[in-house]
Amino acid sequence: MRPPGTPRTQPAPDRSRGSGFVRRANRRAAVAASMATAVLAGAIGAGSVGGSTSTGGTTGTTGTSTAATTAESSSTSSTASTSTVAASGAPTTTTSTAVASSGGS
Amino acid sequence: MAAAGTLTNADWYLMRSSGAVSLVLLTAAFVLGIATLRRWRPMDLPRFVTASLHRSLSLLAVVFLTTHVVTAIADPYAVLGFTAAFIPFLAGRNALWVGLGAVSLDLFIVLIVSSVLRARIGARVWRAIHWVAYLSWPLALAHSFGTGSDAGALWLRAVGVSCVVAVGAAVVWRLAAPGFKHLEPRAVSL
C-alpha cells in the first residue's frame, strides 16, 4: 500500500496524449475513407462513361481506373445507347432497361 | 451526355466504392481487435489507444456499410430489395454471393449490438459473441470477390489480397503469442 503523498514508482500513462492521438487518428481515418470512396466512385464512373482515367491522383487510383475501364466496357455502350434514346425522346423506362443490361451491381 | 450518364449511375458507383472501402475498414478493425488482444500499443501510447481505435474504426465501418447497403437497395438494377439485404439468398441476382454479404452484415450487426449492450449481457457473453467476427470477415471478403461488376477487376483483387495478407498476419501474430490461451480480450464496449 502506497502511503499518501508518496510518488508513484511508475509514471501514470499519459491519457491526454493518448486521447489526442485517438482523436486525430479517428479524424484522419474518416477523411481518408470518405475521400477514398469519392475518388474510387469517380474513377469507376470515369472509366465507365468514356474511357477517360481518373485524375484523383491518389496512390493506387491509376490501377483502379484502368481496371474499372475494362470492367465497365459493356456499361459504356449501354450508357451511349441511353443518350441516344434520350435524345430521340423515348420514355425513361427504355433508358432503364438499357442500363440494366450493363450488369447491375 | 456523358455527364448525364455519370449522374444516372452515381448511386451504382457509390455502392461499389463504399463496398470496397467498407472491406478495408472491416479489415483494419479486425486487425486492431487482434492487436488489442495482444496488448499492442502504438508509439508507447497508453493501451486504451488500440482499443479505442478498434472501436472507432468499427463504427466508421458501420457508416460505410450503411452507405453500401442503402445504395444497393436504392439501385434498381441491383435487384436487391430491403429484405434481401438482410435475409440471405433472396437477391434476384447473384443470390449466393449477395447472400454471403447478407450473412456477414447480420453477423456484424450482432457484433455491434452486443458491444453496445456489453454492460448488460456481461463480458463472458460479449466475448463469446465477438468470435463471430472470425466468420463475418471472411464472408464479407467472399462477397467482395464473388459479386458485383468489380468482382473480376484487378484493383478489387489487389484490395482483397492485401486484406487477406493483413488479417492472415494478424491471426498468425495472435496464435504465436506466448500463453495464447490465457489472453483474454479487455472490455471494449461501444
Image (cartoon, coloured by chain):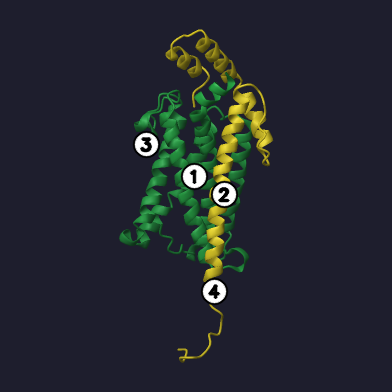
Chain colours: A yellow, B green
Which secondary structure lies at badge 4?
loop
Q: Amino acid at mark 4?
A: Pro
In the image, what residue occupies the spot 40% across and 45% down?
Answer: B107
Query: Residue under mark 3: which chain is it in?
Result: B
User: Which residue extends farthest left?
Assistant: B120
Residue beneath disc 2:
B167
Q: Are marks 3 and 4 in contact (CB under 8 Å)?
A: no
Q: CA distance from mark 1 to mark 3?
A: 16 Å
Say above or below: B27 vs A104: below
Q: Nearer the viewer, residue B184 or B14?
A: B14
Which secondary structure lies at badge 3?
helix
Q: Considering only order in the chain, which callout, 1 or 2, is on the residue closer to the N terminus?
A: 1
Q: Tag on residue B137? A: 1
Q: Amino acid at mark 2?
A: Val
- Mark 3 or 4: in front is 4
Residue beneath disc 4:
A13
Q: Considering only order in the chain, which callout, 3 or 1, is on the residue closer to the N terminus?
A: 3
Q: Is residue B120 left or right of residue B164?
A: left
Residue B175, percent from left and from top: 55, 57
- Please state, as top left, top right, bottom left or bottom right, where the C terminus of chain B lies in the image: bottom left
**Residue neighbourhood size for the residue with mark 3, other residues' Cα within 10 Å, grouped as few (<14), some (14–19), many (≥20):** many
Q: Amino acid at mark 1?
A: Trp
Q: Are marks 4 and 1 in contact (CB under 8 Å)?
A: no
Residue beneath disc 3:
B86
Tell if the residue under mark 2 belongs to the same chain as the one under mark 4.
Answer: no
Which secondary structure lies at badge 2?
helix
Q: Considering only order in the chain, which callout, 3 or 2, is on the residue closer to the N terminus?
A: 3
Query: Residue under mark 1: which chain is it in?
Result: B
- Mark 2 or 3: in front is 3
Tell if the residue under mark 4 belongs to the same chain as the one under mark 1.
Answer: no
